[in-house]
Amino acid sequence: MLEVKDVHQYYGGSHILRGVSLQARAGEVTVVLGRNGVGKTTLLKSLMGLVPIKSGGIVFNGQAVHTAAPYVRAHLGMGYVPQGREIFARLTVQENLQMGLATRPAGTPVPPQLFELFPVLQQMLGRRGGDLSGGQQQQLAIARALASKPKVLILDEPTEGIQPNIIKDIGRVLRQLADQGLDGEPMAILLVEQYYDFAEALADRYLVMERGEVIASGPGSEMQEKGIRQLVAI
Ligand SMILES: Nc1ncnc2c1ncn2[C@@H]1O[C@H](COP(=O)(O)OP(=O)(O)OP(=O)(O)O)[C@@H](O)[C@H]1O
C-alpha cells in the first residue's frame, strides 16, 4: 500500500502541493481528478522522487521512501507511466520494454503476460517506438512500467489524445491489474485523469484536487451523487 501524508512541495516560491494525503491500496483503482494546473502531475512526480518534497511523508509497504532516489522507488515496486508517455522514439518496442527492466538483474526477461494484456505490442516488437500510433505508444508506456512487475502502478492521464477503442482497452487492463495484477496478486492503481467518464467507471476511490489541496474524496460509487463531474468540469 502507498500512503501519502501531508505532503508539501514548492517550485521556487510557489507553494504547489499543500498538505496532500492519500492512500492507494492493492486491489483498488484510486483516481485523482482536478482541473489543469492544480498539481496532479507534481504530486505523481513527488511520489516517484522526480521532484523533492519540502515536508510530509511517503510510505510504501511500510517503508518511508520520500528521500529515496527514483530508481530505488522503482526497484521497491513503484511503476510510473508519465504524462505524454515518454517513449524512446528511436528504440524498438522490444528495447523500450527492456528499459523497464533497468532496475532488475541483467538477463531478466520481459514478462510474457504483457503481450496478453497488449497483443499489438507482440506484433510490433521490432518497430521503432516513434513509428507507433499514440494509442500504441500509451500501451507501450504502460507495458514498460509493468515490465518490472510493480506493486503499485501510477499513471498520469493515460487517455490524453488517445482514440476511444484504445481507451476502452486501457480501462479493461487497469481493472484487471487492480484485481489480479500480472501474477494473480492484486495491484494498487493510482490514476490521474481528466476524462471524467473513464475515471468514474474505474474508480474504487476518488480524490479531487484544487490549488494543491484535496478538496473532496470518497468511494467511487458515490461520485455521481456527490456531483464530482461538476466539480472538475472545465
Ligand atoms: N517545473 C516547474 N517549475 C515551476 N512551476 C511549475 C513546474 N511544473 C509545474 N509548475 C506549476 O505548478 C502548478 C501545478 O502543475 P501540475 O503540472 O502539477 O498540474 P496538473 O494538475 O498536473 O495540470 P495538468 O493537468 O495541466 O498537467 C502549475 O501552476 C504549474 O504552472
Image: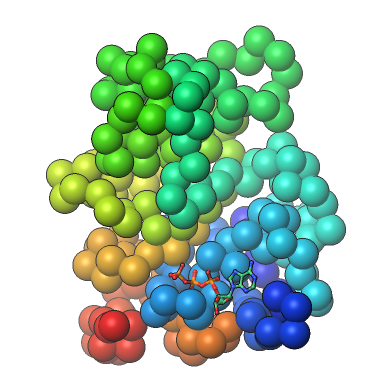
| Residue drawn at point x = 37 percent, y = 52 percent | 158
Q: Is residue 154 left or right of residue 234?
A: right
Whether residue 125 is situated above or below residue 12 in the rendered picture: above
Front residue of 119/86: it is 86
Q: At x 70% / y 29%, what residue is drawn?
A: 103
Residue 37 in the figure: left or right of residue 104: left
**x and y, in percent, of residue 38 in the image:** 50, 80
Q: Residue 31: percent from the left, percent from the top?
A: 42, 66
Residue 9 vertical position relative to residue 112 in the rendered view, above or below: below
Q: Position of residue 15 (x, y in %)?
A: 68, 85
Residue found 71% across the figure and 62% down from its top: 51
Quarter residue 132 falls in: top left
Q: Is residue 7 visible?
A: no
Q: Is residue 207 left or right of residue 24?
A: left
Tell me the residue at 42%/76% (across/down): 36
Q: Quadrant of residue 170?
A: top left
Q: Quadrant of ligand 1?
A: bottom right
Quadrant where the C terminus sits is bottom left
Rendered location of residue 123, percent (x, y)? 28, 15
Pick the residue in front: 110 or 128: 128
Which residue is outermost to the left?
165
Q: Residue furthest right?
A: 67
Check the image and tell me how it is coloured: rainbow
Number of numbered labels in the structure image: 0
Q: Is residue 127 above or below residue 17?
A: above
Nearer to me, 128 or 193? 128
User: Does 49 sit left or right of 92 as displayed?
Assistant: right
When asked about the image quadrant of residue 74, the answer is top right
- Assign the N terminus to one quadrant of the image: bottom right
Observer able to see residue 86: yes
